Image (tube, coloured by chain):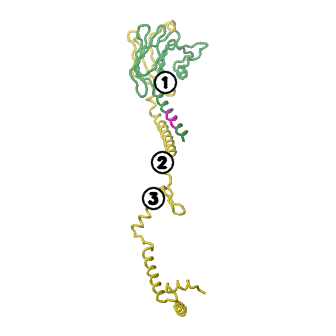
């Protein structure tokens, strides 16, 4: 009897903890990625594993290397952050959270020059890939993933 | 051969007749006292019959009694022992039963939630794909640039595809 009651209390506690963690802070990974075709491609970075197939199919490259990245835990959905490489900077400004994801304003800079600006509703289940400028024989890609 | 007591009882009840009656009355030592005693016994018998006899229930009382018995049976709260004593039984909502009921209810609720979520997801899939609201390129830096949007529903990836951006030398790939 006492054991059954304890079991019930523990089950409810687990359920509440699980539900809370589901709706808690989430991490957004933003990366500047150089896609290239090389003879001996390096393994894909772990952040890109889940979209590897789409990247290869869409862009036709066999190697993807992260040249700059940032990981931000979103609590209010109003944060902003910067992912930078030596020459590029991606500024992300979160402008609110909806049931489906976050509203973001993205600006890609080459040094101090604004190359591209976009507003997107980033879904918690759906990564965003932006094709940037051609860099040498490869391509700059911007990737945002809610982890 | 009847004993005196048997004959006395039969005489009091008026069941002796003929020769047997005459012989018995002749054997009585004091017939007047016996007559008085018989009259008294008959009077008592009449009184007992009237007072202790089973009372006939009226229709209303009978119906009410039946109803009470039925409720007691269905409720299971009270039953009768073979000797007619009432036995109190426990009510249905005991703590173990409440626990079981709540656990089962929770399981049913979870099952329903999972079913509803499964039915809901396909229709709302597009809502969970990232959406590009707008995109701009600097017309001075890249005057011929264009943008288009692709959604890979299979992998749930949204792609903003730009064409005509200024090409850069390989040095820009530095970390």
Mark 3 is surrounded, within 10 Å at the Cα level, by few (under 14), some (14 to 19) or many (20 or more) other residues, namely few
**Taken as a whole, is the magenta stretch helix, strand or loop?**
helix
Chain B's colour is yellow
Secondary structure under tag 2 reads loop
Residue highlighted by disc 1: B157
Above or below — where is B8 with respect to B65? below
Q: Earlier in the sequence, mark 1 or mark 2?
A: 2
At horizontal 41% and vertical 65% (from top left) the residue drawn is B63
Q: In the picture, which quadrant includes the N terminus of chain A? A: top right
Q: Could you tell me how far apart the alpha carbons at marks 3 and 2 are, in whole angstroms?
A: 18 Å
At label 2, counting other C-alpha atoms closer than 10 Å, the crowd grade (few under 14, some 14-19, many 20 or more) is few
Residue under label 2: B93
**How far is mark 3 from mark 1, CA to CA?**
66 Å
Q: Which is more N-terminal, label 2 or label 3?
A: 3
Q: Chain of mark 1?
A: B
Which labelled disc corresponds to residue B71?
3
Placement of A81 over or under B10, stated as above or below: above
Magenta segment: A8-13
User: Mark 3 or mark 1: which comes first in sequence?
Assistant: 3
Residue in front for this viewpoint, B138 or B39? B39
The part of the image, by quadrant, that contains residue B47 is bottom left
Percent position (x, y) of residue A69?
49, 14
């Amino acid at each position: 009897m006492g054991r059954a009651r304890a079991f019930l209390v523990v089950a409810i506690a687990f359920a509440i903890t699980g539900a809370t963690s589901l709706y808690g802070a989430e991490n957004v990974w933003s990366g500047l990625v150089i896609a290239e075709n090389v003879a001996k491609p390096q393994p894909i970075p772990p952040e890109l594993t889940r979209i590897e197939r789409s990247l290869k199919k869409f862009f036709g490259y066999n190697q993807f290397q992260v040249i700059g990245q940032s990981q931000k835990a979103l609590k209010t959905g109003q944060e902003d952050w910067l992912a930078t490489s030596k020459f590029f900077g991606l500024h992300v400004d979160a402008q609110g959270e909806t049931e489906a994801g976050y509203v973001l304003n993205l600006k890609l800079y080459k040094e101090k020059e604004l190359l591209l600006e976009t507003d997107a509703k980033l879904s918690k289940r759906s990564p965003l890939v932006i094709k940037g400028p051609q860099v040498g024989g490869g391509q700059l890609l911007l990737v945002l993933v809610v982890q | 051969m009847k004993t005196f007591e048997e004959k006395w009882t039969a005489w009091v009840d008026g069941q002796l007749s003929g020769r047997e009656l005459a012989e018995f009355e002749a054997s009585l030592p004091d017939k007047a006292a016996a007559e008085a005693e018989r009259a008294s016994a008959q009077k008592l018998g009449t009184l007992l019959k009237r007072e202790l006899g089973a009372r006939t229930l009226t229709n209303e009382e009978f119906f009410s009694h039946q109803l009470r018995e039925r409720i007691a049976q269905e409720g299971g709260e009270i039953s009768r022992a073979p000797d007619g004593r009432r036995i109190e039984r426990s009510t249905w909502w005991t703590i173990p039963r409440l626990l079981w009921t709540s656990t089962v209810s929770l399981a049913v609720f979870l099952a329903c939630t999972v079913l509803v979520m499964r039915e809901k997801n396909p229709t709302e899939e597009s809502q969970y794909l990232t959406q590009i609201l707008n995109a701009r390129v600097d017309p001075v830096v890249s005057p011929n640039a264009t943008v288009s949007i692709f959604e890979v529903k299979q992998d749930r990836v949204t792609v903003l595809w730009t064409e005509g951006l200024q090409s850069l030398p390989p040095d820009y790939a530095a970390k």
